[in-house]
Image (tube, rainbow, N blue to C red):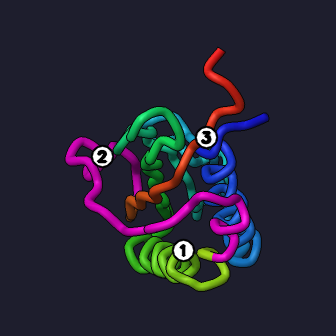
Amino acid sequence: MHSMWFNLAAVFADQTQQLATTLGVGWLDNPPLPLDVKSQGDKVLFVITRGDKLVDQPGCQPERRTLRVLVGAVSLTSNARAEADEMHFAARDKLKSLAFRAALLTVGGAHDLREVEIEPELRDIASPGAVLMSAYEVEYLQTYPSFA
């Protein structure tokens, strides 16, 4: 049995990977920082899970938690800024769509998806070309089969 964190992170990864395939660009799941995307081509979408935090624990169960995910686009071409912007805009559009929200809801317990500020140390990731990122948080409820 997987946690809600794992299942929700998988939705972000699956949906972003599908978009990368549609756009004909590379895709990376949790790449190390600083970004080295050259193995995936000169245009890449990526997802980085940035943690999970406890929001509220009234009594025992369920816990209210928040998952944070970064979704970004990198272009290493001569037209890097424009191409990174196109990919990033497409990713933001996908994550704001009703279909994406429906995919999150199928996991169960997820609600309140919102775009949030990116951590300051990630704004200037050392990478050639152009990098654009958005950070998202999704609140969810986590129950446990037992506390044993």
Camera-side mark, 3 or 1: 3
Which of pointers 2 and 3 lies earlier in the amino acid sequence? 2
The local secondary structure at tag 1 comes to helix
Q: Is residue 130 visible?
A: no
Residue for badge 1? 95
Q: Quadrant of residue 126?
A: top left
The local secondary structure at tag 2 comes to helix
Q: What amino acid type should be assigned to the residue bearing mark 1? A: Leu
Which of pointers 2 and 1 lies earlier in the amino acid sequence? 1
Q: With respect to residue 111, does 57 lie above or below?
A: above
Name the residue at 55% across, 53% down.
47
Label 1 packing within 10 angstroms: few (<14), some (14-19), many (20+): many
- Residue 142, position in %: x, y? 57, 43
Q: What amino acid type should be assigned to the residue bearing mark 2? A: Leu
Q: Nearer the viewer, residue 73 or 117?
A: 117
Q: What amino acid type should be assigned to the residue bearing mark 3? A: Thr
Cα–Cα span, label 2 and label 1:
20 Å
Q: Looking at the rendered structure, which numbered label has been put on residue 28? A: none
Camera-side mark, 2 or 3: 3
Range drawn in magenta: 102-130
Label 3 packing within 10 angstroms: few (<14), some (14-19), many (20+): some
In the orientation shown, which residue stands out farthest toward the top? Answer: 148
Name the residue at 66% across, 14% down.
148
Residue for badge 2? 122
